[in-house]
Every structure is written in structure tokens, then in C-alpha cells.
Amino acid sequence: LVVNVSKDSTRKIPESLFGVFFEEINHAGAGGLWAELVSNRGFEAGGHHSPSIIDPWSIIGSDSLIKVSTEASSCFKTNPVALRMEVACDNDCPVGGVGIYNPGYWGMNIEKGKTYNLVLYIRSMGSVNVSVSLTDSIGMQTLATTNIIKTDVSNWTKIETKLEAKESNTNARLQLKTDKKGVIWFDQVSLMPTDTYKGHGFRNDLFKMVADLKPGFIRFPGGCFVEGEYLRNAFRWKETIGAWEERPGHFGDVWFYWTDDGLGHYEFFQLAEDLGAAPIWVFNNGISHQESVDPSVITPFVQEALDGIEFARGDANSTWGSIRAAMGHPAPFDLKYVAIGNEDCGKPYYRENYLKFYAAIRKAYPDIQMISNCDGSSKQLDHPADMYDFHIYSDARTVFSMANTFDRTSRVGPKAFVSEYAVTGNDAGLGSLLASLAEAGFLIGLEKNSDIVEMASYAPLFVNTNDKRWKPDAIVFDSSQSYGTPSYWMQHFFKYSNGATILNSTLMTNSSSSLEASAIVFQDPVDKKNYLRVKVVNFGSSTVNLKIVVVGLDPNLLDTSASKTVLSSTDVRDENSFANPQKIIPVTTMLEKAGDNIDVVLLPHSLTCFDVLT
Ligand code: AHR
């Protein structure tokens, strides 16, 4: 491999080439990154158009002692359903009383010594005495407890209290119980750990896993989640802002689960800001999987998009910016990119409506970069755009061979946003080494073509192991633990590429059909020193001896020692798991005798990067 460092063979990589794509899929947000522990906190799951269901709430006590039903009697107009609990026993109640419990999203993770913030709304004819507790999954062991004792709750009353855990349990539940005869209504029951990231509601361990990738951007909130199977179930941002109690929530009918929308439009921008990543908002453009709005009536959708941008960017006196300010963020969010729909290019009216969105946004926000869903990699788009989406899900061989896809793309016109890529199917399983190597080869190709590829993100980012709607994914988690698949760790090899300098590199080897390589110079954000990084994927099953020759640089400027980081395993089908979360992770060792000539050995089926101090 010859790496050329001379000035005319270098180019700066975009600051935001590699980022992440967050979609509300696989319970990535609800029951995932969003730390709310109560599932279906408003008893609204099922929505306004169908009979409400209280799942996963359940009853504690026999049917003869307690009956629950839902009623449209809430104090929240946008969120009308409340739970009515009728208790038939009094002094004769079983010990501890009867009531309801919520197991959260496949069990709540309660940690000894931590504090949990409980909010609920309650109403009853007379006084109430409700014991609130966190217990193990069967209600036997109490982890934390408190009592709500009120003499008059004839009007809806907000209760806010803290629960301090005396014991830990990863499969806990929240119980609300009483031993007094009567009727109690509950609504909007929320339990949040107090130690979320900066108090912003993000689960710390999952936030850290994303932050560790140093994403240059975050695309959100979907995906198909943005479109909906039907428009009535699409993500409508206006219904996800303001006080959480007043958010109606919605049933995402593509990935088939209810979200309370605690993780809403505001929280997505906050997430981007906390990650130091540029927000990329994908908005619904009047197209679902089953419907396309006629251009003659698209104006409300255009206005909704403009309002959504104003929410993020408008000053605190603007109509929508003032709501953002009231929610705690007076300064505008740094929104510079929007995508007009998701995977809608071939659908009826896409282009006609796209032009209306494009013109309105361009007029109101001339600097905002707009992303079309139509692929411009092989031919010029027939409509104006700043970028175009490119999605690729395929087998490993195909994805690896696509390293050269953008070599042939015209250098004129909008740039590519590879907003979803992954190896899928048998080659990938739940996240194999094989998949990650193919993806690494593809990303090396994107790096080399980063004059016309502006951004790229793996998809999907998260999966709650209890709800695998899509596989594979980058980060696997349950209520208390998480691990990265090899595709997650592969992305770590690219995290210093944003804003780095790409060098010309040429592979001169007869195994080149199974090798992909690139070379960059980057500044380490911690020690502030410059490093030459050479990444090589060996997609083949043989060991490769490679000589890296650096030309165009004074050899004295290269350190004589280097580090080598390898992602590999004994079997290319190997995966990480909760039982063995670190089976395939990058392993770094020091290499002696570096300089401008480095002899290296590439393991079969491996991704290796060599870092040399320059
Ligand atoms: O990443 C999973 C899904 O794949 C996305 O929702 C969609 O955009 C694509 O089809």
C-alpha cells in the first residue's frame, strides 16, 4: 500500500461525514434511550380512535376486589383517557391492599442508592391513601416505597414525590395499592431516574455509547416512523412538544408499538446538541406507506414543516420559537439540514410536493440544506436539492463491493447522504463480524469519495432485545445493560475521520479484490497531536502480508513506533451477545519499527488500523 502525503494528493473530509441515524424502531427511544420507566403512562395506548388498552398495566388482587376500566375523564384535553380503579374491599383487603402495577418496558431497572422521580395525577370522591412502591417482578420484595395520603382529591391533583431505592433489581415494577374501599382515578403516571444525561431524560449508558462514536450529525426521528403506514399514525411533531402530560402519544403503525412521545421534537434537538452532532430533521411530507397527499391540498403539510423549523430556529419571540424557549431552550437549535420525507421518491406526487416544500423552505430559510429522497448517484436529479438520500441494505459481498459505487458518480450536482447502510440477511444475523467488515470496506469507499459523499450513517442504531423489529442493529440493550455489535465497533475506526485530511493511497497487491484501504491524517482530540491513520479491511479468508510505504513525507517526521487496532475473531460469523459482549471489539497493541516503511500482517477477515504519530 503506497500512501502519498504530498499536498496535491490530499483533501479535507467533511466535518460531518460520519454520524448516526436515530429511529424510533425496536423501542430505541420508548423503553430505550428515553429513560421513562413507565410504559403507557397515560393509559392512552390504542389511541383516540380505538378502545383504549391499558397494557402493560395489570391488576393486583382478585376480580371480586378490584375492577379497572378506562374513561375519557382526564384533566388533559389532548390526552383524555384516565384509569378508573374501583376497590371493593376495606378492612378485609389482603395485606398490603389491592391495586395496579406497571412492569415498564420488559422490567424496570432499579438501582440501589438511586433516586426516582414519580409524578402522577389522582382523583377520588374522598380521601386517598395509596402506597407507591417499586418491587421485584412479582411484587414480593420491596425496593423503594412511599405513601400518598390526601384528604381531598375531588379535583385532579398532581402528586410529585421521590423514591429512593434500598435494593437493586433489573426486572422491577411500579405498584400503586390501597386498602380503602372506593374509586380512584389515575392518570399520567411517570417514573424517571433522576440521573439522566444532564437531567435531559436520556439513559446515561445508551447516551454514552452513541457519544463515544463522536457522531458529526444525528438524523431523526426515522425512517418509516416518520411516514407511518397511514398518515394518521405518522410522527406529527406538533403533538410531541410542550408539557409531557399533554402529549397525546401515538401508535407507530410501521414498527407496531405505542409511544408516549416523551422523546419528542424538542428532545431530539436537545439530544443532537448534547451529542455535539448536527441535527438532521426528517419531516413527514404528506406521504405514508399507503397514502400520498394530492399537491392541491399539500399546503398544511408545508406549513407544518416550516413551523417545525421555526420551532428549532426561531427566536424566543417567534410563534414556535417561543414554545421552545418556554420548554427551556431560549437559544435556537443549530438546525441546518432537513430531509423532505423518507424513501418516498417513487411514490405518487413526491416530486410535485417536494418542489413546494423546497420553494417554501428555500424562501424562508435560504441557508437550510434540503435532502431529496431520490438517488442521484447514477444520474442527475430532475429537481433541485442540496443532497440526496442513498440507502443500501444488502448481503456482505454486495456491500463490500460497493466501496467503488461513488467513484463513478458525477462530481457536479448535489452531494450524497448515505443515510442508511447495513449488511442484512443471513450474512448479518444479529450483527456478525462479516457484516461489519463489508460495511467497513464500503465506508472506506465513502471516505475516499467524500468530495461528493457528505454524510453517512448506519441503520438502525438501537434495538431493545425484547422487541427486535429489525435486525441487525448497532447497539443492543435491555433495561439495564447494553453492548455494541461488530458494526458498532467498526464505526469507531472512522470516528476521527470527520474533518480529517484524506491522503491518496494505492493498493498494489494481488489480493486487492478482498482488500480495501484508506489513509488519513487526523488530530487526536485529547493529546492534540497529529496521526497518520491507515485502515485496511481484509475481507478474504487468508492472512495478508502488507507493506505500507509512506511517500511525500520526511521520514524523520514519522514516529518509529505505531499502534495497531484490530477488529477480528476466530469465525467470521461470530457475534457479540449479553453473555459475551466483548467477543469482538477493537484490540490495540503497540508496533515497534514504524517509520515510512511498515510491514504489517493482516489477519484473515479483519479490520485493522495503524496509527503513527507524525
Ligand atoms: O432502518 C430501518 C428502515 O429501513 C427505515 O425505517 C427505513 O427508512 C428503511 O426502509
Image (spheres, rainbow, N blue to C red):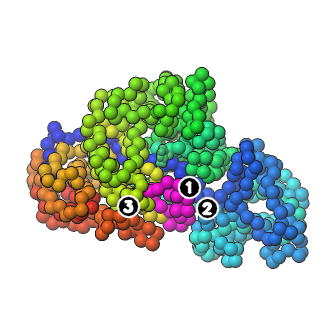
Residue 48 x %, y %: 73, 44
* Figure check: 485 above or below 260: below
**Residue extending farthest front:** 426
Q: Residue at position x 23%, y 49% from top?
A: 518
Where, by quadrant of the figure, is residue 419 drawn? top left
The three-letter amino acid code for the residue at tag 3 is Ser
Q: Residue at position x 73%, y 54% from top?
A: 53
Q: Residue at position x 52%, y 62% from top?
A: 465
The three-letter amino acid code for the residue at tag 2 is Tyr
Q: Pointer 2 and pointer 3: residues touching (CB < 8 Å)?
A: no
Residue 324 x %, y %: 59, 40
Magenta-colored span: 462-481
Q: Is residue 82 left or right of residue 510?
A: right
Q: Which residue is mark 3?
A: 432
Measured Cα–Cα span from mark 2 to mark 3: 26 Å
* Figure check: 119 above or below 216: below
Q: Residue at position x 65%, y 39% from top?
A: 232
Q: Considering depth in this image, is 301 or 598 the residue closer to the camera?
A: 301
Q: Which residue is mark 1?
A: 27
Which comes before the other along the chain, label 1 or label 3?
A: 1
Measured Cα–Cα span from mark 1 to mark 2: 9 Å
Whether ligand 1 has any atom under 8 Å from the Cβ at mark 1 is answered as no
Q: Is residue 549 left or right of residue 329?
A: left
Q: Pointer 1 and pointer 3: residues touching (CB < 8 Å)?
A: no
Q: Pointer 1 and pointer 2: residues touching (CB < 8 Å)?
A: yes
Check disc 3 and report its element: helix, strand or loop.
loop
* Closer to the eye: label 1 or 3: 3
